[in-house]
Image: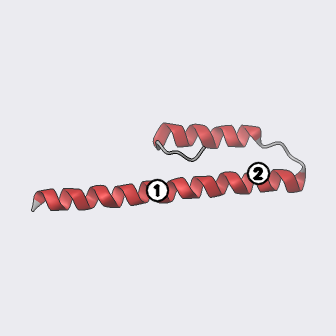
Amino acid sequence: MARKALLKVLEEQQEIIQQQSRLIVELVDTIESWEQTAGYDGEELKERARALCESGIETEIY
């Protein structure tokens, strides 16, 4: 019984991580879109987002 509960929690955590990864990708895309619209180079913001992602979540978004 405890094993099933643990597996369920792990699956839920994996889903949350995947959702967060998708949100980070969307955020980076939005920043890039804003850059193009405003003619602004947001490299620093992208680096911060990338560092945040790497420090907390291991994904294959880049």
| 38 to the left or right of 3 | right
The Cα–Cα distance between marks 2 and 1, rounded to whole angstroms, is 21 Å
Is the residue 31 above or below the residue 57 in the image? below
Quadrant hosting residue 15: bottom left
- What type is the residue that disc 1 sits on? Gln
Quadrant of the drawing holding the N terminus = bottom left
From the image, tell me which residue sits under label 2.
Answer: 32
Figure quadrant of residue 44? top right
Q: How many marks?
A: 2
Label 1 neighbourhood size at 10 Å, few (<14), some (14-19), many (20+)?
some
Assign a secondary structure to mark 2. helix
Specify whether 36 is left or right of 5: right
Looking at the image, is 17 positioned above or below residue 62? below
Which residue is at a point 76% across and 51% down the rendered structure image?
32
Query: Relative to 44, does residue 22 appear above or below in the rendering?
Result: below
Which residue is disc 1 drawn over?
Answer: 18
Residue 30, horizontal then vertical, whole percent: 72, 57
Residue at the right extreme of this rendering:
39
Q: Position of residue 27 (x, y in %)?
A: 65, 55
Which residue occupies 60% across, 43% down? Answer: 62
**Measuring 57% from the left and 58% from the top, which residue is drawn there?**
23
Residue pictured at 85% horizontal, 52% vertical? 36
Image location of residue 16, percent across then percent down: 42, 59
- Which amino acid lies under the numbered mark 2 shown in the image of this protein? Glu
Q: Could you say whether the residue bearing mark 1 is in a helix, strand or loop?
A: helix
User: Considering only order in the chain, which callout, 1 or 2, is on the residue closer to the N terminus?
Assistant: 1
Q: Which mark is residue 3?
A: none
In this picture, residue 19 sits left or right of residue 49: left
Q: Left of 62 or right of it: where is 45?
A: right
